[in-house]
Image: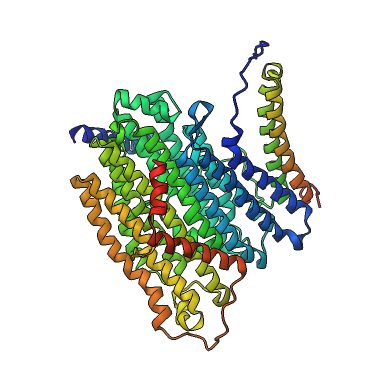
Amino acid sequence: MLSAATVHIATPAFDWHAFAPDLVLVATMVVVLVADLLLPDRESWRTSSIAAVGLLGALVPIATLVHSGHDRNLFNGAYVVDHYALALKAFFIIATYITVLLSVDYIREGDYYKGEFYFLLLVSTFGMSIMASSRDLISLFVALETISIPTFVLATFRKHDRASNEAGVKYYLIGVLSSALMLYGMSLIYGVTGATKLSDIAAYMSQHGTVPLVAVAMFLSLVGFAFKVSAVPFHFWAPDTYEGAPTPVTAFLSVASKAGGFVALINIVYFGFFLPNGRAADSWWPVLWVLAALSMTLGNLVALRQTNIVRMLAYSSVAQGGFMLVPFAAAGIAGADGHPGKAAAAMSAVVIYLLIYGAMNLGAFAVVIAVARRTRSAEISSYDGLWEIAPGLAVVMGIFLASLAGVPFFAGWFAKFVMFRAIIDAGTGWAIALGIIAAVNSVIAFFYYARPIRAMIFHAPTTEDRTPIVIPQPLFAAIALTVSVVVVVGIYPQVFARVGELAF
Amino acid sequence: MTEFYRQYLAVAVFVLAAFLMVGAMLGVARLLRPKVPQDEKYITYESGSDPLPLFGQMNVRYYIYALLFVIFDVEAVFIFPWAVNVEGLGWFGLVEMSAFVAVLLLGLAYVWRKGLLRWA
């Protein structure tokens, strides 16, 4: 029976400023949904403008929070707004903004539900924004589901296309499986430590050291996350989902959604099982080591054989995920060795890599969408002679691919540089071995990134049609934005290096 | 390093135990059970009654109604404990619950406006 006695709870002190970015996102979500209901069908594409304005609006409180300069703890430290969280919130919001730019004409011209598209995109972004601040297993899990569930629907957005339906169902089933594994791991963590808050878990770990059950729990959680970030051997859903989903959604999945998984991984592993002294790092770095090595190698080798550029970019994103895991594993190695300072530097390398990867991958997908507007194809052969038809697009695509390969002086080069620096800092045999695997893979990657470039320059165009490719303004803005980030960060890497340093 | 191997030994033992348990359950059952194959045993199990001969042509609208029902059912689950403690929670609780209900009502408005509540 319920007791009649009333429970008095203290009204929690609420820091509205700290919550402002999330609240702006929620308000935008509501406005988009209501606008979609009120506008006639012909006009409903205008919800994209509302979403875009709302996303830019959410950047304003982030700027003021950065300016105010001190870390904010809410709900007894379960929700933290510090530089790390703010940097990632800004990244997620800008990545979504670029996705909206990519989607506007794609969604407007196709037979899609328009308002819902932007609504779902915003819900997922809201989840990411919460994720960046979550320091508690429960809010972390809720944030991860908020990220994932809308993306399952987005993947099936080409309703009448079988491939798109397959993409969504595969993504959904894998998503549920990974959530189940992750929850199992989390429940074991709770069982051992008796805490869900990451700082409490960290305190327990530094006091008691790891027990074998923690290794089991971490193994299960990490496998769950490995599905989310499509690390080998849990990657098999990624190429099919990426190919079947609408291309702007693919761009979103491969950048924002993947980054969401990585941030979850950083939060749980670094804030829960590393701080304050790195004693618990032994329980997770070997798993990350194996995942990194497999993802890089298999992702690259399979990418070599692709003839479809979206599939190639899908495998490339698997491989890039592997590269991102390298400094992560290095941080664990350094931490277990007793060098928390070096580990923090390695973690900032993960964040820098994530930011740079976001810019160059979104850019590459923007060009794929632009080219597909004319050719209606994503085969690499459809890039034959692009240099003659659209020299501007060919140059930009060349820049993105070169950056993904890590050619100096584009941003991707700096990402690779911080990755190898983290390896050298960690310095143990295991770290060096991983570094060698990463170096070999960086060379392999050149071959498949070079193939579209070769097709664009040296192959003759397959059609006689020489009419220029018309790029709508939003798409042009997205390409301009990403290419300028890739070029500027390549020349002045200090911009992102500073962000990475502030974060840790 | 030895400490480290011992930890990962636990993972190996865990995985092995998982496979062994499933294997043992199926294997022991296979050894113990009598094997008398009959056609009836291959019919889909429907709690004892014969499975319906219908090849399920369900109206998809039931599905939408079921979904809506679940949403508002869950809403009730959240509102009950709040209603029991309304006085203790005070204004803060009231505002929080209003926000929650408002978001759900927005969902209802969406469904209504998209015409999903019409049985046509």
- Residue A278 point in image, percent of width and height: 30, 33
Query: Which one is in front, B56 or A83?
Result: A83
State which quarter of the image contains the C terminus of chain A: top left
State which quarter of the image contains the N terminus of chain A: top right
A217 w.r.t. A121: above or below: above
- Residue A61 point in image, percent of width and height: 58, 43
**At 41% across and 52% down in the image, what residue appears?**
A496
A109 w.r.t. A200: above or below: below
Give the image quarter of residue B45.
top right
Give the image quarter of residue A452.
bottom left
Query: Which one is in front, A354 or A1?
Result: A354
B79 w.r.t. A226: above or below: above
**At 45% across and 28% down in the image, what residue appears?**
A197
Q: Is residue B38 in view?
A: no
- Residue A181 point in image, percent of width and height: 43, 39
A267 relative position to A72: left or right: left
- Residue A214 point in image, percent of width and height: 33, 31
**At 68% across and 32% down in the image, what residue appears?**
B75
Q: Is residue A210 in view?
A: yes
A8 relative position to A284: left or right: right
The scheme the figure's colours follow is rainbow
Query: Which one is in front, A166 or A329?
Result: A329
B51 relative position to A358: left or right: right
